[in-house]
Amino acid sequence: MLGLEKAKVDEVDLVVIEMDTYGGLVTDAKDIVEMLLDFDKPVYVFINKDAASAGALISIACDSIYMSPGASIGAATVVMGEGEAAPDKYQSYMRSTMRSTAEEKGRDPAIAEAMVDERIEIEGVTKEGEVITFTTSEAIKHGFCEGEVNSIEEMLDKAGIQNYKVENFTIGVVEKIIAFFLNPFLSGILIMIIVGGIWFELQSPGIGFPIFASILAAILYFIPYYLNGLAANWELIMFAVGIILIGIELVAFPGFGIFGITGISLTITALILVMLANDVFDFTLVPLGEIVMATASTLAGFIGSFLLLIFGGIQLTNTRLFKRVALIGVQDRAEGYTAIFRDNSLMGLKGIAQTVLRPSGRVIIESEVYDAYTRGEFIMEDEEIEVISEEGTTLLVKKVSEKS
């Protein structure tokens, strides 16, 4: 598809496709066929060995078909993930597509349809119970090949094309980067960063590095799948809704309730679906192995993020880098050290939370703003608090109950 787009930009006179495939996704093949039929310059295909299934459909959509000795074309029955034939609604779609494409290019539509459906019998061509797969000579005999050649150069010479300049299309850097990020293992790592970044950000006030790391990981995760046609808009919306529900659970309703459960379920489901070529919730044509791999990568990312939160923090404190940037010595009060610069104690005083404390944040006491934290409870903005301890420059506070 990218090659045809580049051919349009470069205004080439002829496009040659070298074909050797056992097939692929029907939906992707249909998109390629539509582009070929709309392309306003001749398109030749050189079948170098195999053009099965989706490859046969794409070949039939080209203006001229040439095949190498020993090559084959056909066997376009739609199969499911485990290799068995897909339900008839998919076969019907493929039959119709093959038939209309053959008609568009002046080839026998019945033969094209019989490449999909074994029930079709054509006298002198195929018997009932056999799906058509043509050899090179058979394809030439029945009008599905213009000639037998050994190379693209021989094909062009046989087609009477002289004085030409060949420009080979290769995948660019951007496409290679996209393919790199489609790796399930890397996807799992990105999921780990997304989840871990959001969690770290929710544990500290303000906007910091964790949320930026999470956003960057989300971009690197979703964009390659979106550009590759796997991530649908509704799947992205599902992910966003899941994150919002998790945020509501953590901020407004601390605990583990319906918002959290629903949010986590939507988030995990969206991350899995983004990796799959599903049709909404129809997974008929998605190989079971791909579903298992997507699920495993997503769950591994989630579990890995929580393990990183638990064990990564402990290991970080033992690194040389941490000891260089963090104060790990003890400055005892008995030795004259103090971090309290207030003249009067704030013990027992009451005030209000300036920000949400989950568990740290800021409070206002007698018109002054102080850093504060709780013993683990969540305190919402503007709720009344009481100082129960002074820990250096930070105050330990608790929520004032309505009875007090």
Image (cartoon, rainbow, N blue to C red):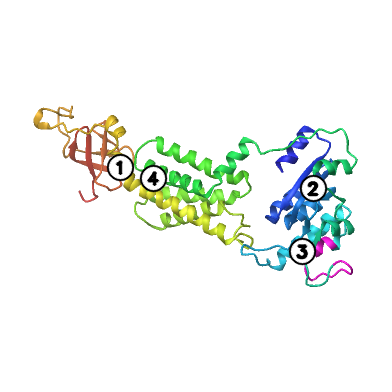
Is residue 366 shown left or right of residue 273?
A: left
Outermost residue on the right side: it is 160
Give, as a three-letter code, the residue at label 4: Trp
Residue at mark 3 to residue at mark 2: CA–CA distance: 22 Å
Q: In this picture, which residue range is highlighted in magenta?
A: 111-125
Q: Mark 4: which secondary structure?
A: helix
Could you tell me if residue 42 is visible in this image? no
Looking at the figure, which quarter contains the N terminus?
A: top right
Q: Mark 3: which secondary structure?
A: loop
Dividing the picture into quadrants, the one containing residue 363 is: top left
- Of tags 3 and 2, the one toward the viewer is 2
Mark 3 near mark 2, Cβ–Cβ under 8 Å?
A: no
Provide the residue designation for mark 3.
116
Provide the residue designation for mark 1.
315
Residue at mark 4 to residue at mark 2: CA–CA distance: 54 Å
- Residue appearing at x 77%, y 45% in the figure: 17
Mark 3 Cα-neighbour bin, 10 Å: few <14, some 14–19, many ≥20:
many
- Of tags 4 and 1, the one toward the viewer is 1
Pointer 2 or 1: first along the chain: 2
Mark 2 Cα-neighbour bin, 10 Å: few <14, some 14–19, many ≥20:
many
Provide the residue designation for mark 2.
46
Pointer 4 or 3: first along the chain: 3
Provide the residue designation for mark 4.
199
Give, as a three-letter code, the residue at label 2: Phe
